[in-house]
Amino acid sequence: MRIAFLGLGIMGSRMAANLAAGDFELTVWNRTAARAEELATSHAGVEVAASPQAAATDVDVVVSMVVDGPQVEAILLGEDGAAAGASPGTTFVDCSTIGPEEARRIGAALQERSLTLLDAPVTGSSPRAEDGTLTIMVGGPDEAFARVRPVLEAMGELIVHAGPLGQGQLVKVINNAVAASNAAVLGEALLMAQAAGADLDALIEVMAAGSGGSAMLTLKAEPMRRHDYTTLMKPGPDGREEVRAFFKTDHMLKDVRLCLEAAREAGIEFPAGEATERILATASELGHGEHDFAALITALERQTGSQL
C-alpha cells in the first residue's frame, strides 16, 4: 500500500516512523523540510515530497497529522494541497483533532473531488505514538475504514470505529475534556492537601491504589509537584532519557474548546469543561502555551494564592 504522510511533529513523526517500519511505501511531507529529510535518512525507502500535492500523487492513502482545522484545510484543500495531487478514490485519514463540524465540512469538500475522508484522531501521547500503541477513534464509511485498517493498526493498538464522519472527532474532544478536567481536579487536590498539612507522597500512593487513581494521577502529579513541564524527555529507570507524555497546553485548550462547542450545539451544559477551559486559558496567558498541560498548576496556584 502506498501512503503519503503529512505533518511530522511530536506525534506525526513517530506515527510515520511506525508506518516506515511496516510493509508500506511511504512518502512524507512536513512544513519544516529538515524533519522529513531526517525521517528519510533514518528509514530506508522513505521518500520526501516538496509539497502535499506531490506527496499525494500516486498513493492509496493520505494520512495527515497537524495542529488544527485551518492547517488541515490548508494542506488538503489549499494551493498545492493533497487533494490536487490525489487520484479519485484515494482515502484521506486525518489524525489531527479539529472537531466534528470541521471534519464534516472538509470531508464534503473532498467528496466533491471523489475523495473519501476518515476522521481518525488519536489519543495516547508521544510515548504510545513511538511504540505504536495509540488509541485511534475513527469516523467515516465502513468500506473506507476496512480498507485503511492495516494502516491504522501499524500506528495504534486499539482501533475504534465510532460511527459516521465526525464521530471520531466528537469522541476525541470529549475524552480530552475529561482528561483535562481530571488533571485540573488533581491539581486542586494537591494544593488543598498541602495547605491542610497532608503528606503528598502518602496521598498519591493511596489515590493510586484506590478509586482516586487515574491516568492523570500517574502522568501529571509529579510534573505538577516539580513544576517540570517544559521538556519532552525525562530520565528513565536506567538513567537514559525517554519520551514523556507531553501534550501542549495550547493544544489541550483547543480540544476543550472544541468539546464545549459540540456541547453548545447539542444544547447541553458542561460546567466542569468550562471551568477547565478557564484554567487552561490562564496557564497559557502565564506563558505556558507551549509547555505540557501539567502547567495548569500555575493557574491554580495563582487562583489559590499558594505554591505547590
Image (cartoon, rainbow, N blue to C red):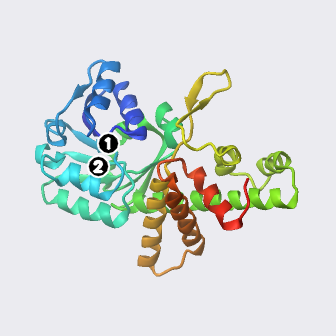
Q: Residue at x 29, y 42 (%)?
A: 63
Left or right: 235, with 174 as reference point: right
Considering depth in this image, is 128 or 182 the residue closer to the camera?
A: 182
- Between the C-alphas of marks 1 and 2, the distance is 6 Å
How many numbered tags mark residues here?
2
Residue 1 at least partly seen:
no
Density class for disc 1 (Cα within 10 Å; few <14, some 14-19, many ≥20) is some
- For the N terminus, the quadrant is top left
Residue 231: where, in percent of width, then height? 54, 38
In the figure, 149 relative to 259: above or below? Answer: above
Element on which disc 1 rests: helix
The location of residue 306, given as percent across then percent down, is: 73, 60
- Is label 2 in a helix, a strand or a loop? helix
Vertically, is 251 above or below 53?
A: below
Residue at 28%, 53% (x, y): give it. 71
Residue 16 placement (x, y as % from top left): 35, 33
Residue at position x 59%, y 57% in the image: 296
Q: Nearer the viewer, residue 93 or 232?
A: 232
Q: Residue furthest bottom?
A: 267
Residue 286 coordinates in the image, percent (x, y): 53, 58
For residue 90, which numbered disc appears in the image?
A: none
Residue 9 or residue 98, whichever sits in front: 9
The reply to whether dot 1 and dot 2 touch (C-beta < 8 Å) is yes
Is 255 situated left or right of 302 in this image?
left
Q: Can residue 273 be seen in the rendering of this structure?
A: yes
Q: Which residue is mark 1?
A: 148
Residue type of the residue flagged with mark 2: Ala
> Looking at numbered disc 1 in the image, what kind of residue is underneath it?
Val
Q: Residue at x 17, y 39 (%)?
A: 51
User: Circle 2 sits on which residue?
Assistant: 144
Disc 2: CA contacts within 10 A as few (<14), some (14-19) or many (>=20) = some
